[in-house]
Image: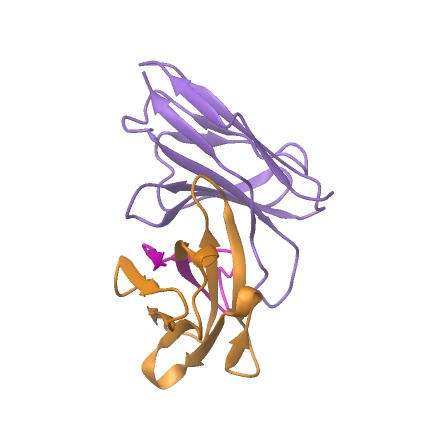
Chain colours: A purple, B orange
């Protein structure tokens, strides 16, 4: 079955620690995205990548980093510089298209909690 | 900058009643519009989207939405609510030109269905 997997489902971070959230897709999509969801805030874009080895900052990139070494994978690192990391993190991907409006398909999410 | 406003963070209806979830957007260019649904602790699933063509869009699970350019609205409706419709609903918009990979989300509307 094609889809997007995120791991782990729950992740605990200690003060000063960097943690990495995994996102893998087997949909052969070029574009991938990371969103942060907080209660009552909707989804906010952290980073996105339109192609391998290229990515752009979204609206709330401070304290986060990403890499895109493979088409299938787009890991997100939450660094110690992110002072309020507790949130639900969602990864998404979308197929290529010249006109835009392509549907973004979402993974099941990772909930990050601070110890 | 684009923005999306979902009127009512919480909507409660009785089973069998009409569901109406409101979405207004601001965009300087013709938009592409989306409605997503999220069940607790899960990712988002596309309900329907408008890109071009017919302004009344039909989606999954009996939902539909109408793009009204003059009112900058894209309200979601369903004639008869079912218990399984209880979830959070998000409206999103992207520009038809420029950075059309970037979705801007509303803050969401939580739908409760009472027996």
Q: Is residue B100 magenta?
A: yes
Q: Is residue B41 above or below residue A114?
A: below
Q: Is residue B101 magenta?
A: yes
Q: Is residue B108 above or below residue A66?
A: below
Residue A7, quarter of picture: top right
- Check the picture and name the quadrant holding the C terminus of chain A: top left
- Check the picture and name the quadrant holding the N terminus of chain A: top right
| Residue located at (56% from left, 78% from top) | B52
Residue lying at the far front in this picture: please name it. B115
Q: Is residue A51 above or below residue A53?
A: below
Q: How many marks?
A: 0
Given residues B53 and B30, the one toward you in this image is B53
Residue A5, quarter of picture: top right
Magenta range is B90-115
| Residue located at (44% from left, 39% from top) | B41
| Residue located at (66% from left, 43% from top) | A3
- Provide residue A109's location: percent of width, then percent of height: 49, 37
- Provide residue A2's location: percent of width, then percent of height: 71, 44
Q: Is residue B1 visible?
A: no
Q: Is residue B15 visible?
A: yes
- Provide residue A33's location: percent of width, then percent of height: 52, 44
- Provide residue B84's location: percent of width, then percent of height: 47, 55
């Amino acid at each position: 079955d094609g889809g997007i997997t995120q791991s782990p489902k729950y992740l605990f971070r200690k003060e000063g620690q960097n943690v990495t959230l995994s996102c893998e897709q087997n949909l052969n999509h070029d574009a991938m995205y990371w969103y942060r969801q907080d209660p009552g805030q909707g989804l906010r874009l952290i980073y996105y990548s339109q192609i391998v080895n290229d990515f752009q900052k979204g609206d709330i990139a401070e304290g986060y980093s990403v890499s895109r070494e493979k088409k299938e994978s787009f890991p997100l690192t939450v660094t110690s510089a992110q002072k309020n990391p507790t949130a639900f993190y969602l990864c998404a991907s979308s197929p290529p298209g010249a006109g835009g409006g392509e549907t973004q398909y979402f993974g099941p999410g990772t909930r990050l909690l601070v110890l | 900058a684009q923005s999306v406003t979902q009127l009512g963070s919480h909507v409660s209806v009785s089973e069998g009643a009409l569901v109406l979830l409101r979405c207004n957007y601001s965009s300087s260019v013709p938009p592409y519009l989306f409605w997503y649904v999220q069940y607790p602790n899960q990712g988002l699933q596309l309900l329907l989207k408008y890109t071009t063509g017919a302004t009344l869009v039909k989606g999954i699970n009996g939902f539909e939405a109408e793009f009204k350019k003059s009112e900058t609205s894209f309200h979601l409706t369903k004639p008869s609510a079912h218990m399984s419709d209880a979830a959070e609903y998000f409206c999103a918009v992207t520009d038809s030109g420029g950075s059309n990979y970037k979705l801007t989300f509303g803050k969401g509307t939580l739908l409760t269905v009472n027996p």
